[in-house]
Structures are given as structure tokens and as C-alpha cells.
Image (cartoon, rainbow, N blue to C red):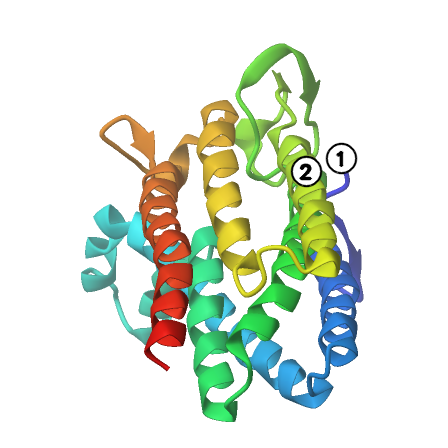
Amino acid sequence: MFPGFTILGKFISSYSLCAIAGIFTACPLSIHWYKKRGGNDIALILVYLFGAVGAFLGMHILYGITNIPLWYFLAESEGIKDFILKFAQIFGGSVFYGGLLGGLLAGGISVRVQKLPAGLTTDCAAPALALFHCFGRIGCFMGGCCYGVESEHGITFTRSLIESANGVPRVPVQLYEAAFELALFFALWLLLNKGILKNRLLLVYIITYSVGRFILEFWRGDEYRGFLFGLSTSQIISILVFVVSAVIFVIKPKKRAESVEES
């Protein structure tokens, strides 16, 4: 594993580098697809910029929510500096679902404000989102976070920044999810090029990912993620996201058909 390196006294994590690589690979592809179909590339860049802000806030807010039992430490802070330090510890981590939901909300607002074609925008974004997440999970593997359960046939971390991950062979669940996301990327790319499930590819991504994430969570070994009713926080969110997205997926074409009949 390679968690990162230090330059001029500043630590650069492998996860950050992978995330940056994902952004500069996935976004240009999405913009190319969008422009090729008659969209405005500058407008889509603005959508992604707003989406990035929403994703950043969302991933940290949801992480903080999973740490609700620790919030009482904030009330015990001794001064502003101590409060900021504890706040950073409670909200400093990230949860993908928080980033996904926050990014979709902020990006959706940008689409509406700019009056962009929502279906085309989300169709072009769906494969790119899967590709970006693939890079992110590779970064998780390199850094040793989001690690898997112990397994005699697993991979042993020795340099993970999370001490509990080191020293025992673990299921490389990060790579499993990266492979799943890569396969999802190619599937969505094919659907986009073929014009299949037009205006619903983002829903396809969310529905498929929620199922995959629910299953992969059983091989996760980082128990600090939070659990409720025997399920992890991400599994509970996966169920909710799947149900809501599936309902929208079914209802959306029916509404379109009704509007065509009325006209």
C-alpha cells in the first residue's frame, strides 16, 4: 500500500491524487459527450463546480451525522481553538453517499437555474460519476481506508493510516467496489451511446450502485461507520435510495406518456 508522501513538510495522500485523477478523467469525458449532443460545455462545467461544492459539504455533513454520539464533546470545548479541533475530528471524515446526495442537490439547482436539459445533463454525468468513484476506491485501497473484513486469503495492510487496518489479511473490498464501478461505467457508456433508457441513466446508476453497495458492505471491516438494526449506515441509506430511485424510474415514463396524451 502507498498512503502518500510528504513534500515540503506537507503530506499528500494517495486518495487525493486518485480523486484528482478521477476528476480530470471523468469530467472531460462527460463534457465531451454533452457537447457532442448539442450541450453547452461551459454550462456543464458550472454544474460540476456547484456539484463539487455540494459534494464536499454533503460528505462531511453525513460523516458528522454518523458521529452524533460524539457531539456532546463540542459542548465541553475549552475555547474556540478546542471547539474547532473537535469539530474537525467529528466532521473531518467523508461518506460517499453524503457527497453523492449533496452533489446531486447542488448540481440539480445549477441545472435548473441555467435552464439546461436535465435529462441530457444527467445522462452524460452518470457514466462519469461511476468512473470517478472507481478512481476514488482505488485511492481508498492505496491509503488503507474503507478496509475489508479479516480473511486468510486477503491482503495485509502494513502502512494504512488507520492502525486497526494493519497487520492482518483483509478482503480487498475497495478493489471489488472499484471493479464494480468500472463495469458500471462501461455499461452506462454503452447505454448512452445507444440511446437506451434516455433521460434515466442517472437513476440506473443510483439504483444499481445502491444494490452493489448494500452487498459489498457485508465485506467491510471498518466498524466505526455506524450501525442501526444490524445494518451499516450505508446499507440503510442504500435501501432508502433504492426505493426512492426505483419509484421515480417507474413513474417518470408514465408521466411523460400522460403529458403527451394531454397535448
Badge 1 amino acid: Met
- Which quadrant is the C terminus positioned in? bottom left
Left/right of residue 72 with respect to residue 170 in the rendered view: left
Left/right of residue 78 with respect to residue 197 in the rendered view: left
Q: Measured from the top left, where is residue 189 in percent x and y?
A: 72, 54
Quarter of the figure with residue 262: bottom left
Q: Could you tell me which residue is drawn at 49 percent across and 26 percent down?
A: 221
Residue closer to the observer: 218 or 122: 122
Badge 2 amino acid: Phe
Residue 183 visible somewhere in the drawing: yes
Q: Measured from the top left, where is residue 92 in percent x and y?
A: 45, 59
Q: Could you tell me which residue is drawn at 33 percent across and 51 percent down?
A: 247
The number of discs equals 2
Q: Measured from the top left, where is residue 194 in percent x and y?
A: 73, 56
Q: Could you tell me which residue is drawn at 28 percent across and 72 percent down?
A: 79
Q: Are marks 1 and 2 in contact (CB under 8 Å)?
A: yes
Residue 60 visible somewhere in the drawing: no
Residue closer to the observer: 86 or 97: 97
Quarter of the figure with residue 231: top left
Whole-number angstrom distance, CA of label 1 to CA of label 2 = 7 Å
Q: Measured from the top left, where is residue 98 in percent x and y?
A: 42, 58
Mark 1 lies on residue: 1
Q: Mark 1: few, some, or many residues within 10 Å (few <14, many ≥20)? A: some
Left/right of residue 38 with respect to residue 250 in the rendered view: right
Quarter of the figure with residue 105: bottom left
Residue at the far top in the pictured view: 152
- Element type at mark 1: loop
Q: Mark 2: few, some, or many residues within 10 Å (few <14, many ≥20)? A: many
Mark 2 lies on residue: 141
- Which quadrant is the N terminus positioned in? top right
